[in-house]
Image (tube, grey):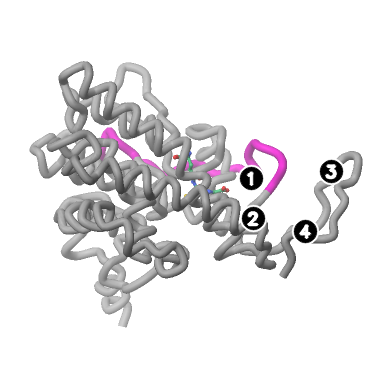
Amino acid sequence: MSKLPDYTPPKVWKWENENGGQFANINRPIAGPTHEKELPRGKHPLQLYSLATPNGVKVTVMLEELLAAGYSEAEYDAWLITIREGEQFGSGFVGINPNSKIPALMDYSTAKPTRVFESGSILLYLAEKFGGAFLPKDPADRAECLSWLFWQMGSAPYLGGGFGHFYAYAPVKIEYCIDRFTMETKRQLDVLNRHLENNKFMCGDEYTIADMAIWPWYGAAVSNSIYEAAEFLDAKIYTNVIRWAGEIADRPQVKRGRMVNRATGPLEKQLRERHDASDFETKTQDKLESQKD
Ligand SMILES: N[C@@H](CCC(=O)N[C@@H](CS)C(=O)NCC(=O)O)C(=O)O
């Protein structure tokens, strides 16, 4: 373990062997599709192509929240995109998201079908589509909500791509990188902790798309659900974040949203594809596998 690994970058970087570590097989320095593959399409106007990572969960929680709030037109089909197998590089997926990352949404209810990519953009699109649901009406409160939504989009890559990558996934533990991103992750947790001291949710008393964006990353970090790093981050000191995360985790809509497009963990919590509200009762992976016998 060294703060200063012995490496001198060449004049021009070249893509040679896999660089090791988890996800090395899907890392590429070029964009665009690797293969032809049409995406499936179900019966609802909203078609989601995703996976239950923190970025994917934001959108399935929002859709379940909309449905629970009575917006029946938020019914959706959710299709599984297995990123470890490179399904985000299929031509159909790249047609919806040129950036080849889940989540991606198609809305066929519009005059011209609408594609939406980037989780924050999808949350805002859905909020606006359903009359401003989970988005404050007052202009100052709306601005506060969008500030936190965009804070998440800019901040979480340091937690995921920075801290999570070097702490949990990199094939070598590099002290310099772990220090740098732990420092930033803890600073971000402190930002949230100070804010949540006097706010029930990110935008005061109202639960909004800002909570839906921030919770899957930072709620997971303090409850040890990502990177097994809660102890390392001394997460117990962020008491306000822990209180807020627990309240959100208890919402039935959030429990359902977390199950959609999940392909790991307990079988009864995996609803790999969702096409109907009744699928939560009948199509979880434990039930599908017991029918095979
Ligand atoms: N900023 C994007 C990030 C999406 C993202 O990073 N998705 C990851 C999974 S959490 C992914 O699809 N990775 C596949 C890849 O990098 O090839 C968003 O918020 O939607």
User: Which region of the structure is painted magenta?
Assistant: 28-47
Residue 193 horizontal/vertical position (percent): 30, 48
Kind of residue indicated by mark 4: Leu
Mark 1 to mark 3: distance in Å? 26 Å
Q: Quick check: 18 left or right of 124?
A: right
Q: Are marks 1 and 3 in contact (CB under 8 Å)?
A: no
Label annotation for residue 13: 3
Label 2 or label 3, whichever comes before in sequence order = 3
Q: Nearer the viewer, residue 236 or 73?
A: 236
- Point 21% across, 24% down: residue: 141
Q: Mark 2 near ligand 1 (CB under 8 Å)? A: no
Quarter where residue 143 is shown: top left
- The residue type indicated by label 1 comes to His
SS of the residue under disc 1: loop
Sequence-first tag of 1 and 2: 1
Q: Position of residue 15 (x, y in %)?
A: 81, 48
| Residue found 45% across the figure and 66% down from its top | 229
Q: Could you tell me if residue 203 is visible in this image? A: yes
Magenta-span inclusion, residue 43:
yes
How far is mark 4 from mark 1, CA to CA? 40 Å
Residue 150 horizontal/vertical position (percent): 39, 31
Lower sequence index among marks 4 and 3: 4
- Residue nearest the viewer, comparing 228 with 102: 228
Numbered mark located on residue 4 in the image: 4
Mark in front: 2 vs 3: 2
Assign the C terminus to one quadrant of the image: bottom left
Task: Say which residue label 1 marks.
Answer: 35
Q: Which residue position holds label 2?
A: 177
Distance of label 1 from label 2 (alpha carbons):
35 Å
Q: Is residue 187 left or right of residue 248?
A: right
